[in-house]
Every structure is written in C-alpha cells, then in structure tokens.
Image (cartoon, coloured by chain):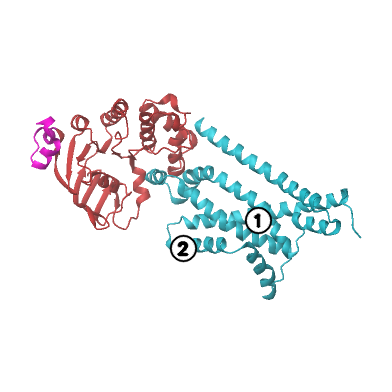
Amino acid sequence: MPVVQVEGVHKRFGAVEVLKGIDLAVEGGEVVAIIGRSGSGKSTLLRCINGLEQIQSGRIEVSGHSIDPSGRGLRELRKDVGIVFQSYNLFPHLRVGENIMLAPRIVLGVSKSEARSRAEETLAEVGLAERFDAWPDNLSGGQQQRVAIARSLAMRPKVMLFDEVTSALDPELTGEVLATMERLARHGMTMLLVTHEMGFARRVATTTVFMHQGKVWEMGPSERIFGAPETPELRQFLGGGLK
Amino acid sequence: MIRQFTQSEFLFILASARWTLLLTLMSMLLGGLLGFLVALARTSRLAPLRTLAAGWIGVIQGVPVLMLLFLSYYGLALAGFDLPPLIAATVSMALYASGFLGEIWRGSIQAVPWQQWEASSALAFSRPQQYRYVILPQAVRIAIPPTVGFLVQLVKNTSIVSIIGVVELARAGNLVNNATFQPFKVFGTVAAIYFVICWPISLLARRLEGRLHARRAG
C-alpha cells in the first residue's frame, strides 16, 4: 500500500489549469524529487497533498486519509503530513523550543514533558540542540529552516513535504539544510521534495518526477531520469551541463 | 452672585473626573468586547459575517457620536426605554468604540503575514487554535499603539456626554465657569486634569511597545 496516492488530480487557478490529471504513488521510505520549470505545477502538486490547495477533481490519499474536492478530513490528514516551506514560517513570538512544542501540545494533546522531549529530540536531529531557548529572529536562515524541519518532525509525520526549502538561502547555508534532509532520508522518512538542487535530487531521491505543463512528463529512478532522459523536454530542462 | 474659584470648586471638578474615568473604562471594556467580535467577524471565512461587520464599522464610523448619544437617550426614551443619562452615555460610547476598535483590530489581525496561517494550518491547527496561539499573540503587538491612541481619544471624547446632562469633567468645568466667570482658571484646570489622565496612558503605551519589541529581539 503506498503512503501517498494521487489519482487523476486536476487543479485550476481561475481559468488556468495548473494540474492536468496527476497520478503518483509513493511507497513508504521512498524519497521522491519533483523537478520542472517554474509554473510546471510542481509546488502546487505538493501543496495539494496536504490540502493547502483545494483540488477540483481526483483523489489524494495519504496513509489512509483521503482528500477530495470537498476538503473534509483535512486536519486528520495534516497530522500525518509535515511540510516545510521556502520561507521557514516559524512563529516569531515563540522561542525555538516553544515553536516545536506547540503543535504536539495542542493538536495531538501530548503532555508538556512529552512535547518537550520531542522538541529536544528533533532539535538534536537537525543539529540545533543548544538553540532550544533562542528566538527565531536570532537564527540564520539555514538554522530557521532546520527548526522548521524539527517542528514538523515533532508531529511524527508519516510523510514529509519540502517545498523548495533551500531557495531562499545563501549557498553556504543551503548545504546544512540539505545535509539535514539527507540524514532524514537515510533514517527511512518518506519524503517528497520540490527542488532546484539537481545534484541533491540525483544523489538522494530514489525516484524523480519531471513535471511539465501540469503533467507528470517523465518519472523513474533518479539515476535513469538524470542519466538517460527520454523526452526532449526533460533533456532540454536538464540542459547542457548533464549532456 | 459671582463665586470665587476656590478649593471647593477645584475639588468639585476633580471629583467629577471619576465619571470621565468610569465612562472611559466602561466604554473601553464593552466597546472592546464588541469590537473584538467585530474584528473576528470582519476576518471570518463566512462572507455574510464579513459583510455584517463591515456594515457595522461603516455605520459607526460614519455617524457622529452625538447622534448615537441622542438616539440612545432621547430616541429610546420615546420608544419607552427610559435610560438614565449615564447608561445612555456608556452605551453610545461603547458602540462608538466598537466601530473603531473593530477596524483597528481587523487591521492588526490582517497585518500578521498570511504564511503564519498557512504554517499553522499545515500543522493541523483548528481555526480557533490558529487565532489563540499564533495569530492573536502577534496581532496584539501590532494593535497596541493604535489601540492606546484610540483610548486617549476616548478619554477626551467622553466630554461629549455632558450634552445629555452627565456631569463629568467637561460639564463640571462648565458649571463652575458659569458661577465664577473665570474661564482661564477653570478650563485650564479641566485641561490639566485631562492631560494628567491621558499622558500616563501614552507613556504606558510606549513602554509596552518597547518591552514587546525587546522581548522579540531578546
């Protein structure tokens, strides 16, 4: 049984159809990179998977919870799906530790001590154990992004979504975030990531999906996608460097 | 007979300031409560609620307080509800405050970046949880300066209720002046008392603002 199952998903913004019938299945422990040009619908697809965007038709199922166009059952689904955004979006009025403890406390209802130990554990996992009491504003972009990852992990999600999480970072900060994600992947987390980091996708992702004009244009094992692209669009997208 | 502006006149004016304070306090509390609901309705996901709140704000802001006062005092009296002046005054000032506070707080809520809504809903927060733990704590910081600014306005604008016979600070000054004909002394005193009430509020606002910023930069 796949952890994420996307079937015939259509999504429109007004008159513009952004997703034109997407089918995708992600097995537990798989790391799926979604690549493609801006406007190809890759971020939209990711955001549909936890219901941040409403779909017009089709079905999305994540670890037994389904989203349909009615939008029912979203909260249950979101407990199992973590997402990290390009702009971190930490809660600026809360310290790092409180940022992480909040959702387990109020959404899952775990005890304060349990929330605290989850926060300490996930902060250690992203290499920021000593920043528990820091304010988000006092952290670098890379550190804020790692806290955002820890905040999602504290919910013990079954899937993690990463939406261009390094796009806002300086090159020297990108590495620390990618390393964190790579460690997560090694530990068996099921991950879907929209990324422009082709080297990272090729090395870490088990499967790569190339999206073009709102469709899954080509998908397969990352080695094959990057090593032997079949469609001219993908070859053109990957460009000269990889020829 | 013309009376002198003595200590007893001064004490009369000073004592009447309690009605100004009480009126401000009550209208801020009631108006704040109603204004909070208006702000929530104004930022609701339900279109009819938003429209209703926008209508409320539009009407309250577009009508002079004086008319609210006349309507609740004379108007309701005609309709058979004989409100004591102080109650009519409180009701009118509270309605007035609700319109302005509702709009100030709507702006403060909407000034919180939309990504904060998105991040919290992605963490499976319910809508009330988003307000309680993420949006309102940030909106409060944004709201403090304009809210206190409005409070200072409210203190001064309570003088309008003297018109239906509530003897608050301004009305007391008027009465004393009518008896003493010493407008500079009398209204100078009245003005000084208003200032003594309003200035600390402004100072407090500045301190609060500074403290909240300091905490965030911590």
Q: Colour of chain A?
A: red
Considering the whole magenta stretch, tell me its main secondary structure: helix
Amino acid type of the residue that numbered disc 2 sits on in the rendered structure: Thr
Answer above or below: position of B9 versus A222: below
Residue B49 visible in the picture: yes
Q: How many residues crowd mark 1 within 10 Å: few (<14), some (14–19), many (20+)?
A: many
- Which image quadrant for residue A130? top left
Res. B27 mark: 1
- Which image quadrant for residue A87? top left
Q: Which residues are magenta?
A: A223-243
Question: Which residue is painted at 53% across and 44% down in the image?
Answer: B140
Asked whether, in this view, residue A73 is left or right of residue B182, the answer is: left
Amino acid type of the residue that numbered disc 1 sits on in the rendered structure: Ser
Q: Which residue is most to the right?
A: B1
Q: Earlier in the sequence, mark 2 or mark 1?
A: 1
* Residue tagged 2: B51
Specify whether residue A234 is painted magenta. Answer: yes
Q: Colour of chain B?
A: cyan
Q: Secondary structure at mark 1?
A: helix
Question: Which residue is painted at 18% across and 44% down in the image?
Answer: A211
Residue A60 rendering spot, x and y as whole percentages: 26, 50
Closer to the camera in the image, A63 or A160: A160
Q: Quadrant of the C terminus of chain A?
A: top left
- Which image quadrant for residue A234? top left
Q: On what subunit does the disc labeled 2 rest?
A: B
Residue A57 rendering spot, x and y as whole percentages: 24, 57
Instruction: Kindly check if marks 2 and 1 are in contact, taking CB atoms under 8 A apart as contact.
Output: no
